[in-house]
Amino acid sequence: MSVEQVSENVDELRWFKSSYSGSGGGNCVEVAAGLGAVYVRDSKVAGGGPVLRVGRGEWAAFVALAVE
């Protein structure tokens, strides 16, 4: 699996917050799809926290296992 921390500017991506995110915070993530990868970050520190870059194939495999 290829996962790396991203140091490039990802502010231009369109981020989607997990549907499990409530108004009270909690442990939630945001995801954005790029051309060659999917980006994941913590929704509580979206502006300045770390961002992970995951290959599209690896992300598809993760989602397939998560919904089983």
Image (spheres, helix red, strand yellow):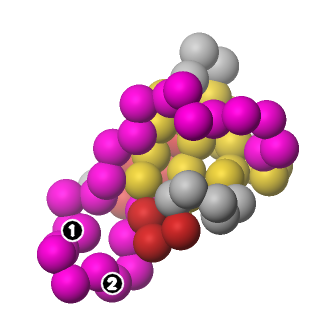
Q: Amino acid at mark 2?
A: Gly
Left/right of residue 63 with respect to residue 11 in the rendered view: left
Residue at the extreme front: 47
Residue 2 location, quadrant: top right
Q: Secondary structure at mark 2?
A: loop
Q: Residues within 10 Å of mark 2 (few under 14, many from 20)?
A: few
Q: Which residues are magenta?
A: 6-29
- Quarter of the figure that contains the C terminus: bottom left
> Against 41, is 12 above or below?
above
Front in this rendered view, residue 10 or 2: 10
Q: Secondary structure at mark 1?
A: loop
Across and down, in percent, residue 10 comes to 63, 35
Dot 2 or dot 1, earlier in sequence: 1
Q: Which residue is mark 1?
A: 20
Are discs 2 and 1 less than 8 Å apart at CB? yes
Q: Which residue is mark 2?
A: 26
Q: Please say whether residue 11 is visible from this viewpoint.
A: yes
Per the picture, the main secondary structure of the magenta-coloured stretch is: loop
Query: For the point 63% across and 29% down, which residue is it?
Result: 37
Left/right of residue 61 with respect to residue 68 in the rendered view: right
